Amino acid sequence: MLRRLLLASALIMLIGPLGLLADTEKPTVAFLRYGGTSLMSLAEKGILDMLEAYGFISAEERVVLNRAEDLDGEKLNVLYRDAGFDLPTANIMVEDVIDRGADVLVTLTTPVTQIAANITRELDDPPALIFAIVTTPYFAGIADAPCIKDSHIAGTQTHIPYEEFVSTLKVQDPDLEVVGTIFNHSEPNSVYGAEQIAAYANELGMRVEMTSIVTTADLQIATDALLNKGVEAIAIPAGLTIVIGLPTIVETATEYGGVPVFSIASQHVYRNATVGAGFYSVYREGVIAARMLIGHLNDDIDLGRTAVNLTPGFTVAINLDTAAEQDVEISAELLAMADWLIENGESTEGVTPELPEHGIELQDMPIEARREADLAFLAEIYCTDEMISAQKRQLETQWTED
């Protein structure tokens, strides 16, 4: 009943103007990313598509933002920052945009969001913080639970089903005994992912060899170390440093022969992973973050009462070209699970490595209908008093048990 009342209240706003920009000072939004990748581009495209659809940016202004440049727009100012995969730079860029008066920080990836959360929660009047492409918001200390977080923070969690991911190794080879994994100890999502891989692999009777790296320059040595320990497959957790260096891992494993590389996003087959199994729609995550951003700019939502979103899903893709180079025969069972393949350099999904997803356009609809749908989505993730109380009790129980 409460959700219906909230949704009804939100929809009443449709009869008013779209947003408060005509009545208030032009806001400044900072886009902050750890580094540029094809997946980051998909998330950004989702955000910018939404801002353009709502009239916050014009087609001409979109051209500027597509070049990752700052914008002094008619309705919105934008500060665009990229850390170049460097944590000290990420700290500096967060401090910089706060000093420049950013009203909202839109952060992509776990490392940047963790830094932004730590910095802004120390401020008396922090800017809003909306995140996407974050796999471990709770392990990284960005939030304690979907509704238990700082009141200026909201976002969407990139769901990685590690149990299902690890199970694909056994689907490929039921006799698999030794799995290798690599993690970056400075990236919380990477550490968490490696721990999850180890836990689920052990449950399936596999031994896990783990090694850590600091930079992409360490990846060849780390992969060689795993291969020399007799691993029969390599499972890659979340973490941008390792994902960026995925081609190096695959190349090293290919030279060794017979060792497939599994990664936690199906799109990673475009970075030569043998199998990508896990999260898929990064574009959708950008759209969801934009719903929160636009809801905040229009004063439609209270970020403190907006839960961290989580959209389940599991997609499997196989790079048959990589498998052939590695002399790995993909099992019939795993082939049957595949949602799409790469073979002879072509994707059965019909997309490109630069934008490795289909369905990366907004549905064409009138703005009123779009706004109604977006408000309905936001109403579904509203944190009620009952939800907050239940999550607090759950956390207290966990802390007591620990």
Image (tube, rainbow, N blue to C red):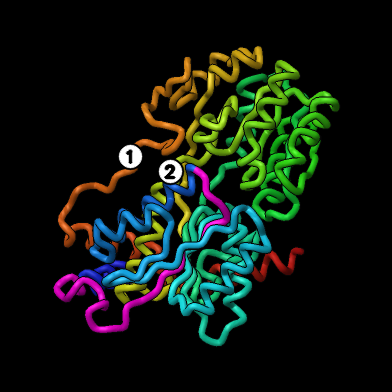
Label pair 2/1, CB-CB below 8 angstroms = yes
Give the amino acid at mark 1: Gly
Viewer-proximal residue among 229 and 111: 111
* Residue 240 in magenta stretch: no
Q: Count neighbours of disc 1 (C-alpha within 10 A) and say few if under 14, some if 14 to 19, many if 20 or more.
A: few
Kindly identify which residue carries mark 1.
359
Quarter where residue 377 is shown: bottom left
Q: Which amino acid does label 2 sit on?
A: Ser
User: Horizontal placement of 56 versus 149: left or right?
Assistant: left
Say if the magenta span includes residue 15.
yes
CA separation, marks 2 and 1? 9 Å
Left or right of 192? Residue 168 is: left
Residue at point 52% right, 76% down? 98
Chain-order first, disc 2 or disc 1: 2
Identified at 50% across, 41% down, the residue is: 279
Around disc 2, counting alpha carbons within 10 Å, would you say few (fewer than 14), some (14 to 19), or many (20 or more)?
Answer: many
